[in-house]
Image (tube, rainbow, N blue to C red):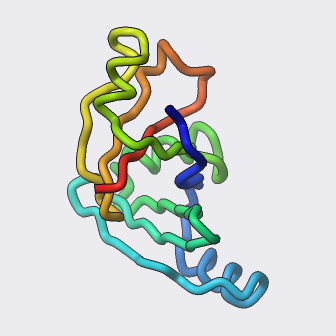
Amino acid sequence: MIKEFHHVAFAVRDLDKIIKLMENTYGMKVHSRTEITERQMEAVLFKMADTYLEYLAPTTETSPLNGFIRNNGEGFHHIACLVDSIEQARRLLPKGALLETRKSDVGNWLVADFNREFGSGLITQIVQID
C-alpha cells in the first residue's frame, strides 16, 4: 500500500531564513513557494530525488500553525507517504482511519490525513499523485 516517503514537513517562523540556509549550506534550490491564504500560512518545497522537504510558516498571529509552533516549537510538523490510490488505502485501512481527501495546496497531488486515533501521536498523511 505505502510506496515511499513523499514529503516531510517542518513548521518554522521564517521561510526566508530557511531558504537561505538550504541554498547556501546545502546547495538546494526552491522547487516552489506558495501562499496559502485560507490557512494563513506559506509553504516552500525543496525536492530531493523523489521526496520533498516542506517548510511551513504562519502568515498571521491567528494562524493555527502559529499555535502549533507556540506549543511545540519550530521543527517537525508531519510526514506524508505516497500511495497509488487513497481510495484503495481507505478500503484496506480500518474504518475511520483516514479523514476526507483534499487537493494539496502546494502540489499536484491529493492528500488524506490520518485520524489521530490511528496514529502514534504524529501528524501523518498519505498522498496520491493527481
Q: In the rendering, at what x and y percent does residue 17 appear?
A: 62, 78
Q: Is residue 13 above or below residue 93?
A: below
Q: Which residue is the extreme one toward the right?
A: 25
Instruction: Name the quadrant containing residue 114.
Output: top left
Residue in the image at 42% along x and 59% along y = 58
Q: How many marks?
A: 0
Direction top: furthest residue: 95
Q: Position of residue 75 (x, y in %)?
A: 66, 51
The image position of residue 111, as x and y in percent, is 34, 44
Q: Is residue 78 visible?
A: no
Q: Quadrant of the C terminus?
A: bottom left
Q: Residue at x 33, y 28 (%)?
A: 88
- Residue 56 visible somewhere in the drawing: yes
Question: In the picture shown, does residue 93 fall above or below 47?
Answer: above
| Residue 54 located left or right of residue 90 | right
Q: Along the horizontal axis of the image, is 50 left or right of 66?
A: right
Left or right of 43? Residue 109 is: left
- Residue 42 spot, x, y in % from top left: 39, 66
Residue 7 vs residue 58: left or right?
right
Instruction: Indicate whether 122 appears above or below 15.
Output: above
Work out whether 94 lies above or below 83.
Answer: above
Q: Residue at x 53, y 62 (%)?
A: 54
